[in-house]
Amino acid sequence: MVIKRGIPVKYSDEVREKAVTLYMACGSELQVSELMSIPRETVKEWRKTQWWRDEMRLQLAERDFKMQQNFGVVIEEAADIVRDRLKNGDVVIDNKGNERRKPVGARDAALIAAIFHDKRRDARNQEVKLEETQTTNQILMDLASKFGEFVKKPKTIEGEVVDAEFTELQKGLQAGGSDGKQGTQSTTSEANPSTT
């Protein structure tokens, strides 16, 4: 909410989205402010918010999607023309001014085939890389989730903590051994009666 002349003003989502669009086009808070009659400080504050960043990402994604669609149409049309020329030949004008088709030369056909082959291979490699990235991202997200669960659930270990070495030496000294070894042997045989 913005205050103009002491009166609070709330801008609609449509106005704010348009401000983001204008900013993406011109890159200037001042120009957005002047073109939309919104105080520059308001635009400046909006740019600091998460919704602004989210809206920019959304608009960029929409723009990329439209561009991909347009590229797809252009590529399909170009491929249709190339396919026609390969099948029927190039259009040429003969000496009498008539259109006719001249077969595409072997060199041109080989070049076209090589380019299409390379582009298809590149596209397939991109798909593989995208799948690998998605798989890696999923693995990392799963690990993060598991670590989060591990940290959230404290585990209690029940039982008595015993310093085994100290206990054996102490028992050995009590049994009369100077270095505790004799006592250790006696405690071992006590602990495991099947060895006697």
Image (cartoon, rainbow, N blue to C red):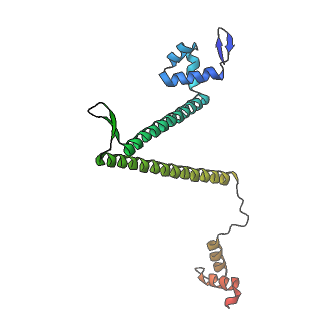
In depth, the one of 194 and 91 nearer the eye is 91
Residue furthest to the left in view is 95
Residue for point 60% across, 24% down: 17
34 up-or-down from 18: above or below: above
- Residue 75: x and y in percent read 45, 39
Q: Is residue 60 visible?
A: yes
On-image quarter of the C terminus: bottom right
Residue 98: x and y, percent?
Answer: 32, 32
Percent of width and height locating residue 58: 58, 33
x, y percentage for residue 95?
26, 33
Rendered image quadrant of residue 100? top left
31 vs 128, nearest the viewer = 128
Could you say which is closer to the camera, residue 156 or residue 183? 156
Decide: is 142 above or below 160. above
Residue 45 appears in the rendering: no
Considering depth in this image, is 10 or 159 the residue closer to the camera?
A: 10
* Quadrant including the N terminus: top right
The residue lying furthest to the front in this view is: 96
- Classify residue 101 by image quadrant: top left
105 sits to left or right of 192: left
